[in-house]
Structures are given as C-alpha cells and as structure tokens.
Image: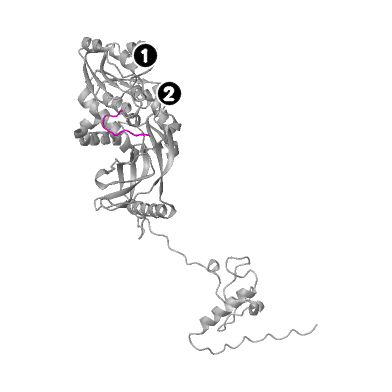
Amino acid sequence: MSPRPARRPPPTPRPRSPGRGRARRRRRGRAHRSRRPGARRGRGGSPRRARHTPAAGRSAAPGRRPTRPASAARRPHHRAPRCARPRPCRTPRPAGRRARRGPRSRRVVRRDAARIYHRIMTVVGAAVPSIALARVPDGAPRPEDFVLVDLPREEVADGQVRVRVLTLSLDPYQRSTLGGRHLGDAPVGPGGLVPGRAVGEVVESRSPEVAVGSTVLAETGWRAEAVVPATAVVPVVVPPGVPLSAALGALGMPGLTAYAAHERHLRPQAGATVVVGAGTGGVGAVAGQLARLAGARAVAVVGSEEKAAIATDRLGYDEAVLRGPGLDGALAEACPDGIDGYLHLGDQATLDVVMERLAVGARVSLCGLMDQYNGAAPTRLRAGAVMAARAEVHGMVVHDHHDLALDHATRVAALLASGELVTVEDRCTGLADAPAAFARLMSGTNVGKVLVDL
C-alpha cells in the first residue's frame, strides 16, 4: 500500500480592504447559484450547513479554526437561504400579558372595506344593478313582472352619501305603489325603479354628519347602491347579539306598525282574546308577542300547518287556526268568549268570519289589505256586525304614529335583547332573487319577514 499523503494545511487568508468582503461574497454567491442547478432559493436540494462546520466525527484542535470538509472548495460561499437559517427561540408571553398590537377596531375595518368597494365600482364601471318594473302586475305579482337592469352610477354631491345595500326589505305596501293605489308614495310605472328600504353601509360621503363606514337605514329602492341625502339616512343601532336586519323588522317600520296598533288601537288587557291575521308575518309576529306580553290570549290566523307550528312553538301564540273554509269553526273553538281585539292583515273572507265573532266592546285595527293590494274587489266591512258588538274600528297608517318611534325602539330593543321577543325571517341572497321572494310574500307562502341579502 502506498503511504497516505500528508494533509494540506489550511489556506492563509488574504488581506482584504475593509468594506469590500461582503460585496465580493455576494457576487460570488450569485455566480455559484447561477452555475449550480437547483441551488437557487425555493428550488430542490438539501439544506446547506453553515460555513466552517466541522466534518462529522472530527473536532477542531484547541486554538485552531474548525476544519472544513474536503468538498468545501466546491460549495458556494454565500449565506444559507432564510428557510435554512436557525431561527431564534422566542420566549412565550406570560399569561395575562396582552399583545402590544391588537386587532383593528371594527369601525376602521368597515371604513377600509367601504373605500375598497368604492374604488372597485369606480374602476369596473359606472353601472348599478337594479330591479325595475317590466309591467304592472295583473293580480298577484310574478317574477316576470320585473327585470334586472344596470342603471347609471350617480355622482355624490355636497350633502349626499353613497350607500351600499347590505340587506333589502320586501314589504306588502310596495305592491300598492306598483298599481298606483298607495296612500302616500308615488305610483311606479313600467321602467321605474321599485321602491324599497334597506340597511346599508356608507361608502362615500360628502357630508360631515355621516362618516364613511357607517351602517344606516335608507330608502334605496331595489338596487345595489344608492345616492341619498345625508339627512335622509338613519343610523342603525341594535342591541348586542341582535342582527342588523332587525332594523328592517321588529325595530323598523313593521315593528312600529305593530306597536302603534297594540298601544293605540287594540290596547289589550290581561285575560282578553286578541286575534292576529297573518300572524307569522313581519307585523303580525310582533303584534302577537306584544299581546302575549300584555297578558292577553293570542290567536294567530295562518295559511299552513308549517306556519301554525311556528306561531305556537316559536312566537308563543296560544292557538293557531288555518285560514280557509273551516275558519269559522276553528275560531269558535279557539275563542269561546268572543274576540276582544283583531288586527286585520289578511283577506276579505277572514275579516267576515272574525267580525261575526266579536265580543261586545271589541276593537278592530285595519292594518293590511293583502287581497286588495293584488287588485281584488275593495274590502268591505259589515256594518251590522260593528253595531252589534259596539265595536271600535280604526284604520292604521304608520306615518300617523311616528311620535311613538322612540318609545317603540326603546321597548322593543330591550325585549329583543332579553329574548322575550323573537324574530322570524324569510331570507334569500342576491338581488336577482328579489322578484321571486316578493311573489312569495304577496301570495302568502313566505314564513316571517322577507329580506334579501346582497
């Protein structure tokens, strides 16, 4: 065997001028990375060890630098990639100590989202998805009576705000505006925007009174966004744990209608019997629960077994009877002592049966004329039944009772927060589904307050 050659001593480091070594190593590293396949960061290959690491099984002599392995001359002389560097061990934060930087407030996040939405809409195009009336409905509305169109995007002037719709409310009164029979709103003809109220977010404001990112209630119509006067928007305030959509239901116009009818028309006493037509709808559901909280016995008139179960199981009605040919016998059994209060939200046939069951001194609130909205014959009241019962009959127009708005909001918000009053909602998603949801509402097949999420 030939003698083993003596090991070469380590090379003597060359003197370098200060400040140039790092640049030279950087250039050297680039050259090595360009010549070695797979040596770039993020590509294949085993992780490299740090420079001047002793070879396996060897140890450096005392006072000397560690010996590099024989293949060190072929390795690139540059720092290891970040993924291969050892990371410093972080000491866990003591319990109870809060982080220095926490999550941003919800108001800041909403403001950023509003700005992003405004920039996207400005860049993508000047068109706003909207629902217009294609033709005046003949009878109950159908989805083909409406059309999805793109309306020009309006500019925001001084004193105005741009509201992006979050949740749109569908209400029976909108049907009367489509036929020109509403008491207060202007009629809507073919090609006109369908009116409506919505909860939305302010994405652009030229008013110091309304900040970008605010959640408001506004008359937007059936469209994705609207420019409205800053004075016409109302801040949305709901109790913790209550959804924002309650501002369109129990805390909104339907809830105020039910509250005004309860406080000023029906005024139920403990032990009285109150019948509510359309007892699971947006107005009827609130009215029935208020009657129960006043100590009265509440009976709901509904259109299906499903609604009857919801009325008794979720809304707390004492009884639920089905609308139709058997209503007279069902009411006789549910109200053996007569009816002390009736909130009319249904059809002519239901009104005729209830009027024959009124107790002496009964109170009636005519609140909704569902069948008349769809173009049926005018609703008629049996004068003989009113005289026989010495009844009080009131016509309900919610705009006459805005002085109760603060009292209504305070009391109903407290009932919602405590769980004594619950809401039932019929929701769908997408503006294109609004016509079908409205058709369900006007045919009585909805369950609860009808809402459209955008």
Q: Residue at point 42% right, 53% down?
A: 120
Taking the image as shown, residue 262 lies to the left or right of residue 164, namely left
Q: Quadrant of the N terminus?
A: bottom right
Q: Secondary structure at mark 1?
A: helix
**Residue 422 visible:** no
Mark 2 near mark 1, Cβ–Cβ under 8 Å? no
Magenta residues span 181-189
- Return the residue at label 1: 327
Label the magenta part by its dominant secondary structure.
loop
Q: Residue furthest right?
A: 1
The residue lying at 35 percent from left, 22 percent from top is 371
Q: Which residue is mark 2?
A: 306
Sequence-earlier tag: 2 or 1:
2
Label 2: which secondary element: helix
Tell me the quarter of the picture where residue 180 sits: top left
Q: Residue shown at 36%/23% (left/top)? A: 375
Which residue is at the front of the view, 113 or 48? Answer: 113
- Measured from the top left, where is residue 450 in percent x and y? 38, 32
Q: CA distance from mark 2 to mark 1?
A: 17 Å
264 in relation to 109, above or below = above
